[in-house]
Image (cartoon, coloured by chain):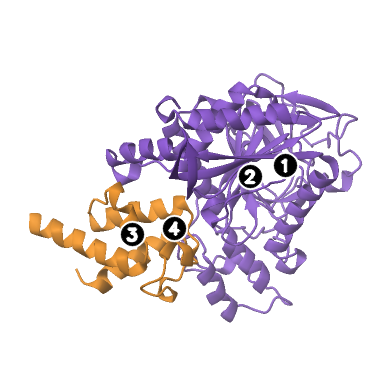
């Protein structure tokens, strides 16, 4: 799965949770929650959505690694790759 | 014969627009059934009925704006005879609080208007409704691209480019052919009227602003507030939460706010005077805890729906209830009882980054509990200085109902309960 596939999935998930949020306006190094004004419940919904769409586990201990847009995309890419290797 | 009147969704509401009836004359209804949808400053609300019976007649048509207390329908109790004269008598007896507003509770004529244009139920997000009002777009002519055909902002903006300007709104004569069929079309018995033209109402954010202004001005004018605050170490609570979440799939994980809400409920058990109302110059503590939660809306403003009977819910159930409430508040699907019965309110501005919130009490309640952001701060304990995650809990109390001593005891109780998260 490419970076742009993951970004597209993130966009789909966000469209359900925060229809006004414009992911394209968030720079790769910017804090996703702050830029899109997501509260903690929104952020949890984003993780639930991503976990379902991509069929990957997102352990709670990894929350700290999911801050910027680039962090999130790279983390998910690694999770998806790890899952495919495991098959 | 029971009278179904426009309910009040709080001290700040004066009127609302009937969007849709969910029942027809002859339908059997039970306590708690949703029988109508209304549009208020707080979004669309599902209105419940509080008696069992059969819908006798519906007196107003969708699209009408009516004051709180206006007669909307008659509900015949089980076993009650059908009156020989079925025409609604108006029912504005001396007991009616709004008998002085008869022109707004007048029954519709009995015969249906000739060839009533069917008013399709419009499924639209509150934001879409606001944008539609701002742009003068007729929502009934917009094709929704959201879930179940719900109209979203982008749909309205697209339509704004093609629809007639607001000065000359064209009433929908027919269903646009591409629209999906609706199951909720009104029956012939239901008198049908066009929705008011969009320019008849102030833009949505402005109306919500006015509603908030009214409630908060009343709070500031009438309630002698006292304010207390205390920092609380969240170390134990967050450690417990982390361990708990490690075991759970992402769908079932808890947020710190669920623990905070549960701690508030436990503390209200300890200091029950803070749960209730000040009405008619009297303090009326309430037994059940309907926990109001301030929820900010994306389009601006906020609503304070309640988690009903929150005292009977576990941490997990509170988490689910909060999730459900936030989702429905933002999509405009709250129930009337959720907006009328809060006995105390919690505001959690921590998500927006502030450390301390000194709130205003929502009348007629007597307390507002605030939580700021959980941040790492220096913390002295047992003669040692360390760094802890800390939240500042605040209380705004109504000094007519309680004193600072009770307030202090309450905040201390919140702290105490958060130090024993496994017992919450």
Q: Colour of chain B?
A: purple
Q: Name the image quarter holding residue B204.
A: bottom right
Residue A11, compared with residue B396, is above or below; it is below
Residue B329: percent from left, percent from top: 56, 49
Q: CA distance from mark 2 to mark 4?
A: 20 Å
Nearer the observer, B412 or B55: B412
Residue B315: percent from left, percent from top: 44, 32
Nearer the observer, A80 or B9: A80
In the rendered structure, are the residues bearing label 3 and label 4 in contact, judged by CB atoms less than 8 Å apart?
Answer: no
* B316 horizontally vs B134: left or right: left
Measuring 59% from the left and 58% from the top, which residue is drawn there? B126
Residue B275, compared with residue A38, is above or below; it is above
Who comes first in sequence, dot 2 or dot 1?
A: 2
Tell me the residue that label 4 is attached to. Answer: A17
Nearer the observer, A71 or B45: A71
Tell me the residue that label 1 is attached to. Answer: B362
Q: Bin the neighbour count of mark 3 within 10 Å (Cα to Cα): few under 14, some 14-19, many 20 and up.
A: some
Q: Colour of chain A?
A: orange
Q: Nearer the viewer, mark 1 or mark 3?
A: 3
Q: Secondary structure at mark 3?
A: loop
Quarter of the image where the N terminus of chain B is located: top right
**Do dots 3 and 2 share one subunit?**
no
* B55 horizontally vs B244: left or right: right
Q: CA distance from mark 1 to mark 3?
A: 37 Å
Tell me the residue that label 3 is attached to. Answer: A66
* B57 horizontally vs B238: left or right: right
Q: Nearer the viewer, mark 2 or mark 1?
A: 1
Q: CA distance from mark 2 to mark 1?
A: 9 Å
Who comes first in sequence, dot 3 or dot 4?
A: 4
Q: Nearer the viewer, mark 3 or mark 4?
A: 3
């Amino acid at each position: 799965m490419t970076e742009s596939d993951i970004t597209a999935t993130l966009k789909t998930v966000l469209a359900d949770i925060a229809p006004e949020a414009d992911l394209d306006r968030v720079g790769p190094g910017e804090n996703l929650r702050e830029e899109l004004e997501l509260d903690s419940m929104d952020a949890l919904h984003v993780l639930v959505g991503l976990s379902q769409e991509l069929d990957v586990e997102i352990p709670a201990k990894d929350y700290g690694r999911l801050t910027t847009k680039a962090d999130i995309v790279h983390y998910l890419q690694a999770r998806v790759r790890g899952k495919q290797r495991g098959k | 014969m029971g009278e179904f009147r426009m309910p009040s969704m709080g001290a700040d509401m004066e009127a609302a627009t009937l969007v849709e009836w969910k029942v027809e004359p002859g339908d059997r209804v039970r306590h708690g059934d949703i029988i109508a949808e209304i549009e208020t400053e707080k979004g669309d609300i599902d209105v419940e009925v509080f008696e069992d019976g059969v819908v006798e007649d519906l007196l107003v048509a969708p699209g009408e704006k009516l004051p709180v207390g206006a007669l909307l329908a008659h509900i015949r109790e089980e076993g009650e005879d059908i009156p020989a004269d079925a025409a609604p008598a108006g029912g504005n007896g001396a007991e009616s609080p709004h008998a002085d507003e008869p022109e707004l509770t007048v029954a519709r004529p009995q015969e249906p208007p000739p060839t009533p244009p069917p008013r399709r139920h419009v499924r639209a997000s509150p934001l879409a409704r606001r944008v539609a009002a701002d742009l003068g777009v007729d929502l009934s002519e917009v094709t929704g691209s959201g879930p179940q055909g719900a109209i979203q902002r982008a749909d309205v903006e697209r339509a704004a480019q093609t629809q007639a300007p607001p000065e000359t709104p064209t009433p929908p004569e027919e269903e646009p052919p591409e629209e999906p069929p609706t199951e909720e079309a009104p029956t012939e018995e239901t008198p049908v009227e066009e929705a008011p033209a969009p320019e008849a109402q102030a833009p949505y954010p402005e109306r919500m602003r006015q509603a908030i202004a009214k409630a908060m001005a009343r709070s500031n004018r009438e309630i002698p507030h006292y304010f207390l605050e205390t920092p609380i170490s969240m170390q134990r609570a967050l450690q417990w939460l982390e361990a708990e979440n490690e075991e759970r799939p992402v769908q079932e994980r808890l947020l710190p706010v669920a623990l905070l809400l549960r701690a508030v409920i436990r503390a209200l058990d300890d200091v029950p005077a803070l749960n209730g109302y000040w009405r008619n110059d009297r303090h009326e503590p309430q037994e059940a805890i309907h926990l109001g939660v301030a929820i900010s809306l994306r389009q601006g403003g906020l609503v304070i729906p309640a988690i009903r009977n929150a005292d009977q819910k576990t941490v997990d159930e509170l988490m689910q209830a909060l999730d459900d409430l936030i989702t429905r508040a933002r999509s405009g699907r709250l129930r009337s009882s959720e907006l009328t019965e809060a006995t105390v309110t919690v505001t959690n501005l921590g998500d927006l980054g502030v450390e301390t919130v000194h709130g205003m009490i929502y009348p007629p309640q007597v307390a507002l509990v605030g939580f700021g952001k959980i941040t790492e701060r220096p913390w002295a304990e047992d003669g040692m200085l360390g760094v802890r995650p800390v939240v500042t809990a605040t209380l705004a109390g109504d000094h007519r109902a309680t004193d600072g001593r009770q307030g202090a005891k309450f905040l201390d109780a919140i702290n105490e309960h958060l130090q024993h998260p496994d017992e919450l």
